[in-house]
Amino acid sequence: MRENRTLGPWRLPAMGLGCMNVSWPQGAATEPGERRDSAIAGIHAGLDAGVRLLDTADIYAPSWDAVGHNELFVAEALATWDAPDEVRDSVVVATKGGITRSEGEKWGRNGSRDYFVAAAEASRERLGVDRIDLWQHHRLDPALPFEDQCENLAHLKDRGLVAEVGVSNYSAEQLTRALEVLGGPTEGGVVSIQNEFSPRYRHDLDVLEVCEQWGVAFLPWSPLGGSRGVRQVESDSGIAEVALNRGLPPALVALAWVVGTSPVIIAIPGATRAETIRECAQVFECELTEGEMESIWATLPPSVERSHELEPTAPFRS
């Protein structure tokens, strides 16, 4: 059994579940029916398999006028999960704010204190909790001083709206600055960062180093690189060979490589089907040997081009 990982005050399994896809326009479960029932069953399958971290955000929604859709969905899935109260209470829900979405699908960013407070209050109501477990700053606002946004993040905790705070899509330099302003987990400051990381996207190894130095949890979004990424690593790397030798699905081996890269990583794949989620949850038992990790590292194809989302003027991407 793989050891649990530290996320602020919690000890959690090495994989959570990203819930965005059930609310994204291409396949949103917006109405009661088979699609919605299947999506809820997927979350329940993950929880039954041992997942104890659910990831959402206020802007995960099928349209600009349905902001909060995914948070409501996560709240419903938790409320309908057949588990004792003490087990349900052990699930950590992480949400994010700081990206705006307005009429006409106009995207923006707002790192002001008033906006943070309003966003956190709205998320708290949708999630049906007195205090949000983990609220992460989704993306920096280029119009405001960096330190002000850090202080505004801390203000949410000071007001009792959130238990813990984290950041998302920060560079290594930005994460270090945030930690210098707010402190790390032991000082009641930043406990997590949620950035892209997968076998096909490996640009944030410097961010991972900062996390290891400060004890910050690294929560990779898209840890399998999407369906196209899985197919790429299956055919172009040692993942396929390890999978063949072990008799395991290549996607599971890829996920085991991600969480095996560092003890601070808690991966959050965005699967929605119960069968796929159960397959991913086998990572709790699947550990690669040092030799297998090295062979995969040695044969990975070049990393895809660095995302420009960290740039202030870059458009939003999921």
Image: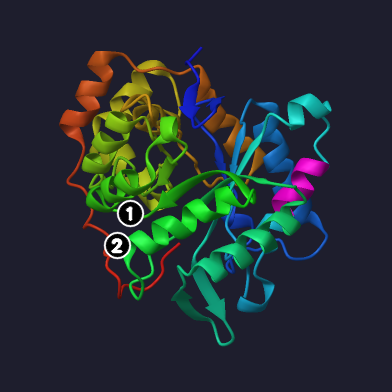
| N-terminal label among 2 and 1 | 1
x, y percent for residue 309: 32, 64
**Marks 2 and 1: CB-CB under 8 Å?**
yes
**Residue drawn at (32%, 62%), measured in percent from left and top?**
146
Badge 1 is on which residue? Answer: 170
x, y percent for residue 259: 39, 29
Of residue 49 and residue 168, the one placed in the foreground of this image is 168
Q: Name the element at disc 1.
A: loop
Label 1: how many Cα within 10 Å (few below 14, some 14–19, many 20+) = many
Question: Is residue 74 located in the magenta-colored stretch of the structure?
Answer: yes
In the picture, measured across the screen, residue 163 lies left or right of residue 168, that is right
* Span shown in magenta: 73-79
Image quadrant in which the C terminus is located: bottom left
Q: Name the element at disc 2.
A: loop
**Residue drawn at (59%, 52%), measured in percent from left and top?**
56
User: Which of the 4 image quadrants contains residue 103?
Assistant: bottom right
Q: Amino acid at mark 1?
A: Tyr
Q: Amino acid at mark 2?
A: Leu
Residue 137 seen by the camera: no
x, y percent for residue 84: 83, 26
